[in-house]
Image: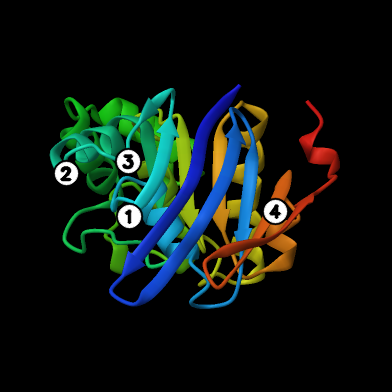
Amino acid sequence: MNLLELKDVSKIYGSVKALQHIDLSVRQGEWLAVMGPSGSGKTTMMNIVGCMDKPSNGAVILDGADISRETPKNLTAIRRDKIGLIFQQFHLINYLTALENVMVAQYYHSLPDEKEAMQALERVGLSNRAKHLPSQLSGGEQQRVCIARALINYPMLILADEPTGNLDETNENIVLDIFRQLHREGSTIIVVTHDPEVAEEAQRTIVLEHGRIAAISENHQKNHQK
Protein backbone atom coordinates (compact mmCIF):
# COMPACT_ATOMS: atom_id res chain seq x y z
CA MET A 1 0.00 0.00 0.00
CA ASN A 2 1.33 3.43 -0.95
CA LEU A 3 1.30 6.03 1.80
CA LEU A 4 2.56 8.79 -0.49
CA GLU A 5 2.27 9.41 -4.23
CA LEU A 6 3.58 12.29 -6.31
CA LYS A 7 1.92 12.41 -9.71
CA ASP A 8 3.50 14.61 -12.40
CA VAL A 9 4.52 17.15 -9.75
CA SER A 10 6.26 20.33 -10.88
CA LYS A 11 7.24 23.46 -8.96
CA ILE A 12 8.10 26.68 -10.79
CA TYR A 13 9.44 29.87 -9.22
CA GLY A 14 9.36 32.54 -11.93
CA SER A 15 11.70 31.19 -14.59
CA VAL A 16 13.21 28.55 -12.29
CA LYS A 17 11.91 25.00 -12.68
CA ALA A 18 12.69 23.63 -9.23
CA LEU A 19 10.84 20.36 -9.86
CA GLN A 20 9.82 18.92 -13.21
CA HIS A 21 7.29 16.13 -13.71
CA ILE A 22 8.08 14.08 -10.61
CA ASP A 23 6.36 10.70 -10.35
CA LEU A 24 7.10 8.84 -7.13
CA SER A 25 5.36 6.35 -4.85
CA VAL A 26 6.43 5.58 -1.29
CA ARG A 27 5.07 2.43 0.32
CA GLN A 28 3.79 2.40 3.85
CA GLY A 29 6.66 1.32 6.08
CA GLU A 30 9.32 2.11 3.46
CA TRP A 31 12.60 3.89 4.17
CA LEU A 32 13.51 6.13 1.21
CA ALA A 33 16.67 8.19 0.74
CA VAL A 34 16.78 11.28 -1.48
CA MET A 35 20.12 12.44 -2.88
CA GLY A 36 21.32 15.01 -5.37
CA PRO A 37 23.57 18.06 -5.66
CA SER A 38 22.63 21.45 -4.24
CA GLY A 39 19.88 23.00 -6.34
CA SER A 40 18.61 19.64 -7.58
CA GLY A 41 15.16 20.07 -5.99
CA LYS A 42 15.54 18.00 -2.82
CA THR A 43 14.41 20.73 -0.42
CA THR A 44 11.58 21.80 -2.73
CA MET A 45 10.28 18.24 -2.86
CA MET A 46 10.55 17.82 0.91
CA ASN A 47 8.71 21.11 1.46
CA ILE A 48 5.87 19.95 -0.76
CA VAL A 49 5.64 16.51 0.86
CA GLY A 50 5.90 18.15 4.30
CA CYS A 51 2.93 20.46 3.60
CA MET A 52 5.09 23.59 3.76
CA ASP A 53 4.58 24.40 0.07
CA LYS A 54 2.29 23.41 -2.78
CA PRO A 55 3.18 22.21 -6.28
CA SER A 56 2.60 24.40 -9.32
CA ASN A 57 1.22 21.35 -11.14
CA GLY A 58 0.43 17.75 -10.37
CA ALA A 59 -1.03 15.92 -7.39
CA VAL A 60 0.37 14.85 -4.01
CA ILE A 61 -1.56 11.99 -2.44
CA LEU A 62 -0.90 11.42 1.27
CA ASP A 63 -2.82 8.70 3.07
CA GLY A 64 -5.31 8.52 0.22
CA ALA A 65 -6.09 12.28 0.07
CA ASP A 66 -4.85 14.88 -2.43
CA ILE A 67 -3.10 17.53 -0.35
CA SER A 68 -1.84 19.57 -3.32
CA ARG A 69 -4.84 21.91 -3.37
CA GLU A 70 -5.43 22.27 0.35
CA THR A 71 -5.53 25.68 2.03
CA PRO A 72 -2.54 26.78 4.14
CA LYS A 73 -4.63 26.26 7.27
CA ASN A 74 -5.48 22.70 6.29
CA LEU A 75 -1.86 21.99 5.33
CA THR A 76 -0.78 23.10 8.79
CA ALA A 77 -3.25 20.67 10.35
CA ILE A 78 -2.10 17.81 8.10
CA ARG A 79 1.56 18.51 8.91
CA ARG A 80 0.75 18.63 12.63
CA ASP A 81 -1.28 15.42 12.63
CA LYS A 82 0.49 13.20 10.11
CA ILE A 83 4.10 14.30 9.59
CA GLY A 84 7.17 14.35 11.84
CA LEU A 85 9.86 16.80 10.70
CA ILE A 86 13.55 16.48 11.60
CA PHE A 87 15.87 19.29 10.51
CA GLN A 88 19.63 19.58 10.11
CA GLN A 89 19.66 22.86 12.07
CA PHE A 90 17.58 21.44 14.96
CA HIS A 91 15.27 24.51 15.37
CA LEU A 92 14.97 24.07 19.13
CA ILE A 93 13.67 26.92 21.29
CA ASN A 94 16.72 28.18 23.17
CA TYR A 95 15.00 29.12 26.43
CA LEU A 96 13.09 25.84 26.79
CA THR A 97 14.48 22.61 28.20
CA ALA A 98 14.71 19.45 26.13
CA LEU A 99 11.51 18.20 27.75
CA GLU A 100 9.68 21.47 27.11
CA ASN A 101 10.81 21.50 23.46
CA VAL A 102 9.17 18.11 23.00
CA MET A 103 6.04 19.25 24.82
CA VAL A 104 5.68 22.25 22.47
CA ALA A 105 4.89 19.80 19.66
CA GLN A 106 2.21 18.23 21.86
CA TYR A 107 0.71 21.65 22.55
CA TYR A 108 0.06 22.28 18.84
CA HIS A 109 -1.39 18.79 18.39
CA SER A 110 -3.50 18.20 21.50
CA LEU A 111 -2.51 18.70 25.14
CA PRO A 112 1.01 18.64 26.60
CA ASP A 113 1.72 15.47 28.55
CA GLU A 114 4.98 15.58 30.51
CA LYS A 115 5.03 11.83 31.14
CA GLU A 116 4.58 11.06 27.46
CA ALA A 117 7.20 13.64 26.47
CA MET A 118 9.64 12.08 28.94
CA GLN A 119 8.98 8.66 27.40
CA ALA A 120 9.84 10.13 23.98
CA LEU A 121 13.15 11.39 25.38
CA GLU A 122 13.79 8.00 26.97
CA ARG A 123 13.28 6.41 23.58
CA VAL A 124 16.19 8.43 22.15
CA GLY A 125 18.33 7.94 25.26
CA LEU A 126 17.99 11.44 26.72
CA SER A 127 15.88 11.05 29.85
CA ASN A 128 18.87 12.17 31.94
CA ARG A 129 19.14 15.41 29.90
CA ALA A 130 15.44 16.36 30.01
CA LYS A 131 15.98 19.50 32.11
CA HIS A 132 18.90 20.81 30.07
CA LEU A 133 18.65 23.77 27.70
CA PRO A 134 19.77 23.34 24.07
CA SER A 135 22.96 25.30 24.84
CA GLN A 136 23.82 22.62 27.42
CA LEU A 137 23.44 19.79 24.92
CA SER A 138 25.84 18.50 22.28
CA GLY A 139 24.88 18.59 18.61
CA GLY A 140 24.03 14.90 18.70
CA GLU A 141 21.87 15.36 21.78
CA GLN A 142 20.04 18.29 20.19
CA GLN A 143 19.32 16.18 17.12
CA ARG A 144 17.90 13.43 19.32
CA VAL A 145 15.63 15.99 20.98
CA CYS A 146 14.43 16.88 17.46
CA ILE A 147 13.71 13.23 16.79
CA ALA A 148 11.76 12.89 20.05
CA ARG A 149 9.80 16.03 19.15
CA ALA A 150 9.03 14.63 15.70
CA LEU A 151 7.82 11.33 17.14
CA ILE A 152 5.69 12.64 20.00
CA ASN A 153 2.48 12.84 17.95
CA TYR A 154 2.93 9.40 16.33
CA PRO A 155 3.29 10.64 12.73
CA MET A 156 2.55 8.34 9.81
CA LEU A 157 5.44 9.88 7.84
CA ILE A 158 8.85 10.98 9.13
CA LEU A 159 10.74 13.52 6.98
CA ALA A 160 14.39 14.10 7.85
CA ASP A 161 16.47 16.76 6.08
CA GLU A 162 20.20 16.00 6.45
CA PRO A 163 19.66 14.61 9.98
CA THR A 164 23.32 13.61 10.34
CA GLY A 165 24.82 16.56 8.44
CA ASN A 166 26.11 18.34 11.55
CA LEU A 167 27.08 15.26 13.55
CA ASP A 168 30.33 13.43 14.20
CA GLU A 169 30.58 9.71 13.43
CA THR A 170 29.58 8.58 16.93
CA ASN A 171 26.43 10.67 17.02
CA GLU A 172 25.63 9.82 13.41
CA ASN A 173 25.59 6.14 14.35
CA ILE A 174 23.33 6.84 17.35
CA VAL A 175 20.84 8.70 15.14
CA LEU A 176 20.94 5.99 12.47
CA ASP A 177 20.30 3.36 15.14
CA ILE A 178 17.15 5.26 16.11
CA PHE A 179 16.02 5.35 12.48
CA ARG A 180 16.71 1.63 12.12
CA GLN A 181 14.55 0.92 15.13
CA LEU A 182 11.76 3.16 13.85
CA HIS A 183 11.87 1.35 10.52
CA ARG A 184 11.70 -2.04 12.21
CA GLU A 185 8.61 -0.79 14.04
CA GLY A 186 6.95 0.07 10.73
CA SER A 187 7.56 3.81 10.37
CA THR A 188 7.65 5.35 6.90
CA ILE A 189 10.82 7.44 6.60
CA ILE A 190 12.15 9.81 3.93
CA VAL A 191 15.69 11.08 4.49
CA VAL A 192 17.44 13.73 2.42
CA THR A 193 21.20 13.23 2.61
CA HIS A 194 24.49 13.95 0.85
CA ASP A 195 26.12 10.96 2.56
CA PRO A 196 26.12 7.73 0.50
CA GLU A 197 26.59 5.66 3.67
CA VAL A 198 23.44 7.17 5.18
CA ALA A 199 21.55 6.60 1.91
CA GLU A 200 22.59 2.95 1.91
CA GLU A 201 20.65 2.45 5.14
CA ALA A 202 17.43 3.07 3.23
CA GLN A 203 15.58 0.46 1.21
CA ARG A 204 15.56 2.65 -1.87
CA THR A 205 17.43 5.74 -3.08
CA ILE A 206 16.31 8.32 -5.61
CA VAL A 207 18.70 10.85 -7.11
CA LEU A 208 17.44 14.25 -8.22
CA GLU A 209 19.19 16.35 -10.85
CA HIS A 210 17.90 19.65 -12.22
CA GLY A 211 14.49 19.04 -10.68
CA ARG A 212 14.03 15.59 -12.21
CA ILE A 213 14.47 12.04 -10.94
CA ALA A 214 17.74 10.94 -12.56
CA ALA A 215 18.04 7.52 -10.94
CA ILE A 216 16.28 5.09 -8.62
CA SER A 217 18.10 2.21 -6.96
CA GLU A 218 17.13 -0.56 -4.58
CA ASN A 219 19.39 -1.04 -1.56
CA HIS A 220 19.82 -4.43 0.06
CA GLN A 221 20.67 -4.27 3.75
CA LYS A 222 20.27 -6.88 6.45
CA ASN A 223 18.53 -4.39 8.70
CA HIS A 224 15.62 -4.21 6.21
CA GLN A 225 14.68 -7.80 6.85
CA LYS A 226 11.72 -7.96 9.18
Give the residue number, with chain letter if any, for mark 4: 205
Q: Mark 3 belongs to which amino acid?
A: Ser
Of callouts 2 and 4, the N-terminal one:
2
Residue 72's tag is 2
Residue 187 spot, x, y in % from top left: 56, 31
Q: Secondary structure at mark 3?
A: loop
Q: Mark 2 belongs to which amino acid?
A: Pro
Q: Nearer the viewer, mark 4 or mark 1?
A: 1
Q: CA distance from mark 4 to mark 1?
A: 25 Å
Of callouts 4 and 3, the N-terminal one:
3
Q: CA distance from mark 1 to mark 2?
A: 15 Å
Image marks 1 and 2: residues in contact by CB distance under 8 Å: no
Residue 74 spot, x, y in % from top left: 19, 34
Residue visible at 73% across and 43% down?
203
Write down the quadrant of residue 155 in the picture: top left
Q: CA distance from mark 2 to mark 3?
A: 10 Å
Give the residue number, with chain letter if any, for mark 1: 56
Residue visible at 16% across and 26% down?
111
Q: Is residue 56 left or right of residue 75?
A: right
Of callouts 4 and 1, the N-terminal one:
1
Q: CA distance from mark 1 to mark 3?
A: 9 Å
Callout 2 environment at 10 Å: few (<14), some (14 to 19), or many (20+)? Answer: few
Of callouts 1 and 3, the N-terminal one:
1
Q: Nearer the viewer, residue 35 or 201?
A: 35
Q: CA distance from mark 4 to mark 3?
A: 24 Å
Give the residue number, with chain letter if any, for mark 3: 68
Q: Nearer the viewer, mark 4 or mark 3?
A: 3
Q: Nearer the viewer, residue 193 or 218?
A: 218
Q: Is residue 205 visible?
A: yes
